[in-house]
Image (tube, coloured by chain):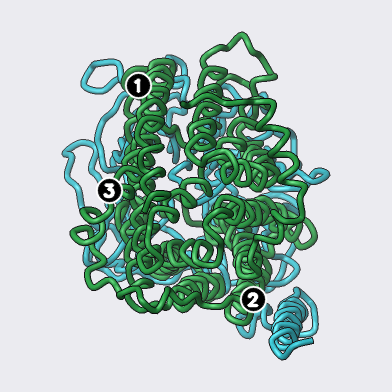
Chain colours: A cyan, B green
Amino acid sequence: MSARGWILVAVVAAAVLLVAAYAWTSAPGGGGSAGLPSSGAGETRIGRLDAVPAPPFLLVRSLVPDGTHGRVAIAPLTAPDGPRYFAPLTCERVFYAAGQGVCLTIGVQGIRTVYAAEIFDASFAVRGRVRLTGVPSRVRVAPDGKLAGVTVFEEGHSYAERGYSTRTTLIDLGAAAEIADLESFAVTRDGQPFHAVDFNFWGVTFTKDSNRFYATLGSGDVKYLVEGDVNARTARVVASGVECPSLSPDNTRIAYKKAHTDARGIGWTLHVLELETRADTALAAETRSVDDQVEWLDDRRVMYHQPSSKGADIWVMDIDGRTPPALLVPMAYSPAVVR
Amino acid sequence: MYSFDWTGDFRAWLANVRRRQTWRQIAPNVWFIGLTSLLTDISSEMVASILPLYLVLGLGLSPFLFGIVDGLYPGVTALVRWGGGALGDRTRQHKGLAAAGYGVSALSRLVWLLVGGHVPGIVATVTADRVGKGVRTAPRDALISLSSPPNALGAAFGVHRAMDAAGAMFGPLTAALILLVAPQRFDLVFVISFALGVVGLAVLLLFVRNQPTATGDAVPTSPLLTGLLPRHRALRLTLLAGCALSLATISDAFIYLLLQRRGLVAASAIPFLYVGTSATYLVLAVPMGTLADRLARWKVFALGHVMLAVAYGVLLMPAFGWPALPIVLLLLGAYYASTDGVLSAMTSAVLPRAERGSGLGLLATATSLGKMGASLLFGWLWSSRGETTALLVFAAALPVAILASVMILPRAQQEIIAA
């Protein structure tokens, strides 16, 4: 064989070795410890829970890279970065309110990947299951626990094509059944019927009365804020430039993310919109991009995640737009405040 | 003049495909470039197919990030294709430029692991991969054309495109297999993708020979539009025909969406449609390339677009029911097999060796801008006038473009034979 042939054999062997070495050292519980936490073991002492505690508390998806990765965990609001207690549930996204929880899962059936919304109660028992059509992205449960809104990304193929689409469905938690796809809602803009094939809905947030909700409607390059009525199956455009809205507990404000492509690069900034006065504040104290549907810790502070080397951490920020954000829960994701 | 002697042509073509002579005309360079493309396509498609999943589940971000990146510089990657080809001519280093493009893309796979959820890092990684892909396209096609005898250009591009399609087909399957064995181990997909990309680059560096243009050929001093287009009438005509047809072409994504809306396929099964189209493309690329060399390239090129027009017709008739799905996928794969490599062969045939890179780069830029325009137009028509009207407009425009190209292309191709 020629010299070039031998060099190619060497390159192939090196490539195989690289893959094998990587797979070996990075395997969970494998030869190395690259994925294991080096510190913070004390912060995340494991306790087991058989039912939710008395409110208030914080419910998260824990990302401590050990056997509990992806498990639903609960921490007291007084010490969110202290010990966390694990529920017997593993989810990709989770939300909980008024005795009803939704856990979005991904599983394998034969050679197919299947997605589902599992509905659980206060003792973490799964009472129902709704099949989802794509990768789970957002979930919110109405404050009264009657409905949930779930957003999934329908599987695209190549990122070279702008072919991403979202689907947002409403689930009746009592019946454990899908009751509507937001795309079937009659939408109006300035009082006129509004429809386009490229309609995409995402990021539902419910008012105290679960019949009314807000969500994002994307069409073309514009992201609209719509206010929806579940019983009437209608929605109307109330603002634009708003993505992933989240209503404050007192229902007076909406925190959302706004896309920017400027000197800071491509990314999203959090904003707060006062529903009464229409006053809009950019939360410029956070200089990093925020790609999340925020959750309100109380009427003055919002929580969101930032990716980290261990997956993600939950941060908290005052809505005055000046106080710098602070780390709230390390190695956690998908927070829900249960009041 | 444009009539086909179907049975006679078919028998002669079948004999031609079977003949060892046909395969012997494929230069080792073409096989090795094909192997590089195959490995690189597995590498890039395995990452592309898991990126939405990785972004949403692995990082908690949204895949709309890609939409923003693509929306930012829609024309830039198209222009990079032209620049890559022109630079290849200028430096006479098509191999070096292609290697740089493949290298940047291979490295970007590893960078995915390092950037994690850092948004500016993700944007930079996606951009680097796009630029790498844009830079290498024209120099790679120039190398294929410079390595092949003029009467076997169609077959050579057919061999390359078949191997490319095989990569596009196996990439998503490989990624799915990895995630099946090791659920949620996106990092493993990136590392394996990087390893495949490096092996592909090694094949190119070790076994592909840079093709010198004839010593007598002057290095083109101005490879820009001002120099190239006015001097070559045949190139102008070929680009015109290619551009007109690309403007009447509905993108795959829209066709699959139409099939989905007819209730013929579930949204979650759309990735399998790409596999189906690639499989047909893979099987037919060499036979169609050989047929193009034998018959006349413009005839096969036009025939490919006729098959696309038939696919539009099938989509317009809901009465077809479920058979519409396999028929459309077969026609789509056959359309690619008869047009993509054949157009590159036609363009190569009308260019002097020293200007193959610039010409093929210009072609890649023109057709990708044409397709981009077609997608915008189709999307707008669909939104404002409904899907049937949008389909009807394209189904009416395509035959007109085919007729125009059938009048233009034979003149362009004859000019070359005379030259």
Local packing at callout 1 (Cα closer than 10 Å; few below 14, some 14-19, many 20+) is some
| Residue A294 in view (yes/no) | no
Query: Is the residue under label 2 in contact with that under label 1 (CB below 8 Å)?
Result: no
Q: Residue at x 47, y 51 (%)?
A: B344
Decide which of tag 2 and tag 3 comes sooner along the chain.
2
> Percent x, y for residue B337?
59, 42
Say above or below: B87 vs B416.
Answer: below
Q: Which residue is mark 1?
A: A195
Q: Nearer the viewer, residue B54 or B283?
A: B283
Q: What is the CA distance from the residue labelled 1 to the residue labelled 3?
A: 47 Å
Q: Amino acid at mark 2?
A: Val
Numbered disc in front, either 2 or 3 = 3
> Percent x, y for residue B97?
43, 75
Write down the quadrant of residue B181 in the picture: bottom right
Q: Nearer the viewer, residue B218 or A191?
A: B218
In the orientation shown, which residue stands out farthest toward the right?
A110
Secondary element under disc 1, as helix, strand or loop, is loop
Q: Residue at x 52, y 17 (%)?
A: B313
Q: Which residue is mark 2?
A: B203
> Percent x, y for residue B57?
58, 55
Say above or below: B203 vs A162.
Answer: below
Say above or below: A71 vs B400.
Answer: below
Q: Amino acid at mark 3?
A: Arg
Secondary element under disc 3, as helix, strand or loop, is helix
Q: Which mark is residue B233?
A: 3
